Amino acid sequence: MNLRRLEFTLTRKCSSQCIHCQAEASPSRKDVMDIKDAYNYLSEAAAVSDLESFMAFGGEPMLYPELAIAVFKKAHELGIPSIDMITNGVWGKDRKKAEKWAEKLKAAGLNKVNMSVDAFHAKHIPIEYPQNAALALVRAGVENIKWNVAVVESIDAENEYDKETKRILKKLEPIGIEANIFKIMPVGRAVQNLREFFKSTPLHGPCEGEPILGNPLTNPDSICIEPSGSVNICWNLSIGNAGKTPLSRIIKEYDWRKDSIIKTLVEDGPIGLLRLPKTHVYEFQETNYINKCHLCTEIRKILNIS
């Protein structure tokens, strides 16, 4: 595995419960990564890989600010050049506190932030909070800050969500921060709540070259570690558990041909999963699925195969 990027889902707990959330985060979630585990994962990955970037997200990582800061500091000490966080900015409620957190984040080595603002987050978080958090980061000297904007169709679409998101971005224009706009994927709560906006595409064909996270399954350059220790190379597609097997070993020994699920996805795509012994009891109905990624994640979830 030619690993270049390491990601942590620090927690699935969030201050919001957005209807589009692909991680199905919510205030009721309790899972959070242990600091000792986080240090260990970072050290092991850095020891066997030439890491170019590290990202922490959630849920909302700043619900545990001391943990997030400690993790960024460790990544910085290990010499990882790009250190990134996705946050909803809820920690900007109090401007003075936001400035203190921003200074600590900057001192820890954080140099890139994606601040989530759109119609979905605005239902739970007043827009002033991420605005305050972003301004605090600018004043602290964090180099790269962008609005992280989810749309169901496009920023110029006429549906109620994208129209509201465009209005929000217009309001934020004076701050001078660029927007990173991305289309919501048919994963998690987005499938149940926004299905009418997804266009169906063919379900047949291999996954290699177009997995949901843009990470080639034959030679992944990115992994995401969950609080449970699960090491994912695609959406909830695990290649091991770093809490049970050393992460360095998982990275060094990865071979897509030795994993029946991944081998099937590479060679046949999600449709191939239906031919595995464990799926013989599953009644497949093609019209139930939006695209290959939706089919893949749903079959693996229903049949409890990773």
Image (spheres, helix red, strand yellow):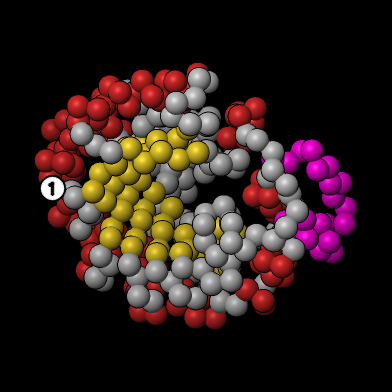
Q: Position of residue 165 (x, y in %)?
A: 40, 25
Residue 119 seen = no
Q: Which residue is mark 1?
A: 141
Identified at 48% across, 57% down, the residue is 226
The stretch of residues the image draws in magenta is 269-290
Q: Position of residue 237 (x, y in %)?
A: 60, 59
Circle 1 packing at 10 Å, graded few (<14), some (14-19), many (20+), is: some
* Relative to 162, residue 82 above or below: below
Q: Secondary structure at mark 1?
A: loop
Q: Quadrant of the C terminus?
A: bottom right
Q: Position of residue 52 (x, y in %)?
A: 32, 67
* Relative to 102, residue 9 above or below: below
Identified at 36% across, 56% down, the residue is 55
* Relative to 194, residue 238 above or below: below
Amino acid type indicated by mark 1:
Gly
Q: Is residue 178 left or right of residue 159?
A: left
